[in-house]
Amino acid sequence: MPAPYTHWFIRARLKTRQLLLLVAMEEEGNIHRAAQVLNMTQPAASKLLKDLEEALGAPLFERLPRGMRPTWYGETMIRHARMALASLSQAHDEIEALKAGRFGQVSVGAITAPGMTLLPAAIALVKQQHPNLRVALQIETSDVLMERLQQGKLDMVIGRLFETHDKTAVRYQSLVEEPVAALARPGHPLTTVAKLGLRDLVGAGWILPPVGSVLRHRFELMFQEEGLEPPVNLIETTALLFITRMLQRSDMVAVVAADVARYYADHGMVAVLPIHLPCKMDSFGLITRTDRLLSPGGKAMLSALRQAAMEVYGVMLDAVP
């Protein structure tokens, strides 16, 4: 590694306010409004931007008749500015936590199924060992979680990596594939059909993920491969609270992850229909960044996830450096 004084940002005397300005300009689309947000004059903001562009030797914004738009260079610098600012904010939070006698904090993201099975087990473990560790959990789609991981808003993610995701500086460890199940209300007429098949489900009303999702695509292919037209009586949503309530109030059927289906069925809220659906989801796994060091709280959470993954899925995750 080169000596610290050789880094360009040391030579250029990069200022935190320059990073804040880049982010504000992207959000506001105008240097005047960005300067107002940061409580500085427009000439001062213009000088900060000019100095940074000269240090980088590249234009960061394209000047338009009404505002400014980031160039490719600017988009790259803005992305890293967001990460740097998020890291600095986390450092402050960790120091404040340590000063207050707490162990620190960790932010974890998960898709729904592991959020209901793996994460409760892992968080229970880590809280037993470190009661003062502040754990923030976000349950979202893989696309949203990957964006937040890239921005430094999450320390780790349990989700899926798709072709469209930026895999630069990302480490992925597969956990399990995710089978799906069909749900209906307890006592639904389809729960008693002998040898229930897809043909019996064509005319049912379905609650499905939106068009464009992997599961929706595979669900429709499943019917087409059987020579059947996909169902047309549809509600599109992934909101589980709505899904379970809607099933209880109607004869509709929903397709969800098998782990999620078992959870609600075990609590008597829904019934799992006696049919195998081959439209399973791809594997999900543990996703971390290779270009960032985990905090002590992050390392503790990772250790708990490894232990819980063995207990819940029978899978041994490697230790992340």
Image (cartoon, helix red, strand yellow):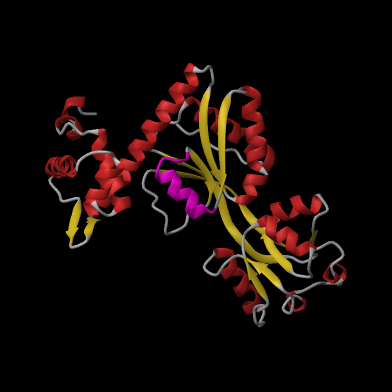
Viewport quadrant of the N terminus: top left
Write down the quadrant of residue 51 in the picture: top left
Identify the residue at horizontal 27%, vertical 51% (top origin): 75
Vertical side of 1 occupied by 144: above or below: below
Residue at position x 80%, y 55% in the image: 269
Q: Residue 244, position in %: x, y? A: 73, 58
Give how far across and how far down residue 180 sits, in percent.
68, 60
Question: Is there any visible trace of residue 184 in the rendered image?
Answer: no
Q: Nearer the viewer, residue 308 or 294?
A: 294
Q: Is residue 9 left or right of residue 90?
A: left
* Residue 219 seen in the figure: yes
Name the chief secondary structure element in magenta.
Answer: helix
Q: In percent of the image, x 67 and y 56: which residue is there? A: 240
Q: Is residue 258 left or right of residue 192?
A: left
Q: Position of residue 149 (x, y in %)?
A: 44, 44
- Seen from the viewer's position, the closer of residues 219 and 78 is 78
Q: What residue do we see at 17% from left, 39% from top?
A: 44
Query: Magenta segment range?
Result: 141-154
- Total label count? 0
- Say whether residue 153 is magenta: yes
Check residue 274 for magenta coloring.
no
Quarter of the image with the C terminus is top left
* Residue 277 image point, x, y percent: 70, 66
For residue 154, side relative to residue 40 (left or right): right
For residue 192, above or below residue 135: below
Residue 17 location, quadrant: top left
Quadrant hosting residue 199: bottom right
